[in-house]
Amino acid sequence: MSTFTETAPLAPPRPLILRRPKSTTGFSSWFTTVDHKKIAIMYGGTALAFFVVGGIEALLIRLQLAGPNGTVLTASQYNTMFTMHGTTMVFLVGMPLAVAFGNYFIPLQIGARDVAFPRLNMFGYWVVLFGGLFIYSGFLFGGAPNGGWFGYAPLTSSPLSTGTLPGHGPDFWVAGIVLLGIGSTSAAINFIVTVLNMRAPGMTLMRMPVFTWMMLVVAFLTLFAMPIVTSAMIMVFFDRNFDTTFFLASQGGDPLLYQHLFWLFGHPEVYILILPGMGIVSEVLPVYSRKPLFGYSVVVFSGIAIGFLGWGVWAHHMFATGLGPVAISAFGLSTMLIAIPTGVKIFNWLGTVYGGAVKLTTAMLFSLGFIAMFTLGGLSGVLHSIVPSDTQQTDTYFVVAHFHYVLFGGLIFGVFSGFFYWWPKIFGRMLDERMGKLTFWAMLIGFNLTFFPMHIVGLVGMPRRTYTYEPGYGWDMLNLLETIGAFVIALATLLFLVNVIYTARRGPIASSDPWDGRSLEWSISSPPPEYNFADVPRVEARDDWWHRKYTEDADGRLVHLPAGGAVDDAEAEVAIVDDAHAGHGIHMPSPSFYPLVVAAGLPFLGYAAVFLNPWFLVPGLVLILFGVYAWGLEPGTEPGTEH
Amino acid sequence: MTPRSWRPRRLFLATAVAVSLVLAGCSEVKNNRQNALQPKGHDAKTINNLFWPIAIIAIVVGILIIVATVYFAIRFRYREGVNDNPKQIHGNTRLELGWTIVPALLLAVIAVPTISTIFDLADQPDADALQVTVVGKQWWWQFEYTDAKVVTADELVIPTGRKVHLELKACEDNICNVIHSFWVPELAGTVDVVPGRTNELTLDADKPGTYLGQCKEYCGLSHANMRFRVIAMTRSDFEEWVSEQQQGPVQPLYAGEGADQKPAGPAQELIATKYQCTSCHSFDNAAAPSYGPNLTHLASRDYFASATYELNKKNLVNWVMNAPSMIPMQTESDKCRPSPVNGCIGMPSFIENVPLGQPKMSRADAEQIADFLLEQK
């Protein structure tokens, strides 16, 4: 490395057309930044924007179903709405939100200055953004997706000429999912390498914060799950356009092949969505209970177990397809099995709160809400593993209730907990707690008002994905309640956004450690400097930052250390000396245009696929080839820029 | 009123209001005949008997955990000087083992009846069972009575107290090659109808009555409208129904033989020649499966159009003229050419977006067709 730094200024390779960006602040820096924290904020902002869009779609769905024979949407609009709501919430909200938190806090929690692949990281973000915009551009260019977020073949794979689903909906969906898969795979690779290679000295795997652990599991799940759905998407695309018959039974294909592939991705995907929430909650509960996480290693290993078992339960989405009693018994059992590590986690969280000194901040309320709501979702999940009874509940609103309790009550409550917990660290200002608590109560009440009645309405026979129903089935009142609840959720979301805008200027300035935190991110300023740690910390224990502030007395009770902490004097002096040099001599990767350029080429390939028009390939390939070439030649760190 | 004591009460109040509203919602049920909690047949009862004990276990566990969460949060809340130095408990192996083993045992208790029920329900019925082939189409159901050689649409008539063995297939024409799901919640659980496969389902009804069913698997534009009815009759009524259905049409479509064959009257002329309804529907053969519903005995049914509209003249006239205005269909005029049928999904409209090469339909014509159909008992 050092030889390179010395020789590089002599002959800098300059095949570049674009000038290398220099500024790391200001508006333009958002397009070129490779700072994992900025990229995380972009992921978060994008995901929140899509959360609002997906929420509006949900409100339209609920308005249509508020009463029998609704006329707010037509059948075709309704089908598009539920497809886009599901696709948006899974691929454009859930996954990017997890990546946002992971991007920001994995390096901070493991004491790293950066992620392993900063430019790949940036590329992944732009692909996700462009992939999302690409899917939504279907509304402008001949049909937004309308085959369901699960996109069952052969409905979606039928050749365009037969018009089983009119328009280009499935084409946009198929190409969009492939694009988003590229984005999430880059994030996953980046996380895995970062966690495995860039931990601070002393940060063994079993000293890592649980959030980082869960994101590692999520990254592995993503890495292995995305190729499966991508191959299914490619088969669908070929069936539609090139006369293959993978899923067309009339020509020898098998529709169940698609379902096996889709759910082999789709069930791990559920854990890709929920494990980050579990990770956040495992960070939040100890801090506001002023106790360590109960059974750290059990929580970690149950997370890993969930990650493994998540691959063995896919066919429980297919209990009604006629797989035969032996197969469905096996998948019923594996589904029950996965309830055990999940239950263990819930009990450990309760064990953390038990005997603590609980501060009911907004973040804590959301985490407690997570436990309660996720438990209900998990238990209705156990009911689904009772195969015979699942044949009554599958594809009814009972399922809709179940997975909203898991994914909204789990992921979204977890994420909101994370927002309130980490906001001061990210933006240097506190969110308003009073508004926050109001947000929590509105969301909790709205959420239960929306989704609890769905259990009942499903049990009494209302199928999902139906745009209309007739009066007299006993569904009217419950549906009305659900719609009212949905608007209460919308109100809560609005209140959160108001909170964000209001506190952006007026919120109290956050100290570096406002919550008396346990993990390393609280040891540096809020917001953190670009290089995160002036000194890369030496980690000596789990919850290392906490151990520098506290210890336990003989009775096992929390005791403050005198200022200066366990760090011995010699080390403290070194730290002070280093502080004086903070930011000097630290090489951070330089900004770059090229990840954005390459990512901008990908949607053109998507349009080429949708319209089967080779001319779209030209700008796409030009951008990609130029971007990759220039990216390859551009040094990661501009020599000498920081000195 | 300190905020601290008020908040849990507010939560309780909101929950109470929500629960009572939900209960109010249930009491409004008048004639719901599509309710999985009102089993009227053997399979549905077996499922219901399995569901409730396990549901109650789940509800109890759920309540315990939620109560514990709320209780711990309140009981151990931070108070200066009282518990600001909580005991730092890192874990407890015995507890961990306990809450791994207890749920495992609980699940084992649940697993045994579950699996035995799976195999019970998979047992094939006796030879006495009534054999019916069910074909799921976009978006209606065709029922073919294997032994009686009778074909109906959207109404499955069955005798009470006798097992009915269904073979479920999806329409395998390249155009309608999609998955459906057959569901009559009061009689049995769902079975998917998958192209390329024949799935089986046995159901029976204890008492005469009408049981509503609906397609459960998203199958395109009009998935929500893919309904049907199961009508259970006493055995003797059923025998009578079968023999009526086996009759030829009340009014034949054609008169004459061979080259002399021509529509038997003006209504038949409209159906067979002018609007070529015959390219999709069968009017003169009660045993013939067809692209659209077999209409030979249409008037013997109470409902039509995926069991959504009551069969009366007003509805039928509107339907004949403009079906897509009553149930959304995918009828692009160039795809709905009468012969050969080329990708038309659903019944075309004869007043707007008329099939290519077809005349527009007058109301008088539609009424004449409806009158004819309403005589086809």
Image (cartoon, coloured by chain):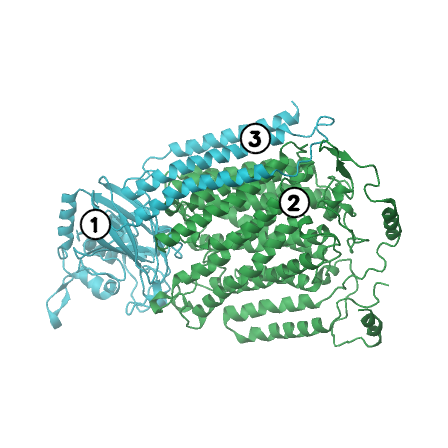
Chain colours: A green, B cyan
In x, y percent, where is residue A488?
55, 39
Residue A190, picture quadrant? bottom right
Relative to the observer, which residue lies in front, B96 or B284? B96
Furthest-top residue in this view: B1
In x, y percent, where is residue B319?
29, 54
- Residue A484 in view (yes/no): no
Disc 2 marks a residue whose amino acid type is Gly
Q: Quadrant of the N terminus of chain A?
A: bottom right
Label 2: chain letter: A
The structure residue drawn at horizontal position 20% and vertical position 57%, both measured from the top left corner, is B146
Q: Are marks 3 and 1 on the same chain?
A: yes
Tag on residue A418? 2
Label 3: chain letter: B
Residue A88, picture quadrant? bottom right
The vertical placement of B64 against A12, above or below, is: above
How far apart, in angstroms, are the residues tagged by discs 3 and 1?
55 Å
The structure residue drawn at horizontal position 32% and vertical position 64%, both measured from the top left corner, is B172
Left or right: residue A526 versus residue B131 is: right
User: Crowdedness of circle 1 by 10 Å Cα count: few (<14), some, many (20+)?
Assistant: few
Pointer 1 with pointer 2, Cβ within 8 A: no
In x, y percent, where is residue A381?
47, 44
Tag on residue B126? 1
Relative to the observer, which residue lies in front, A340 or A54? A340
The residue that label 3 is drawn on is B11
Disc 1 marks a residue whose amino acid type is Asp
How far apart, in angstroms, are the residues tagged by discs 3 and 2?
23 Å
- Residue B32 in view (yes/no): yes
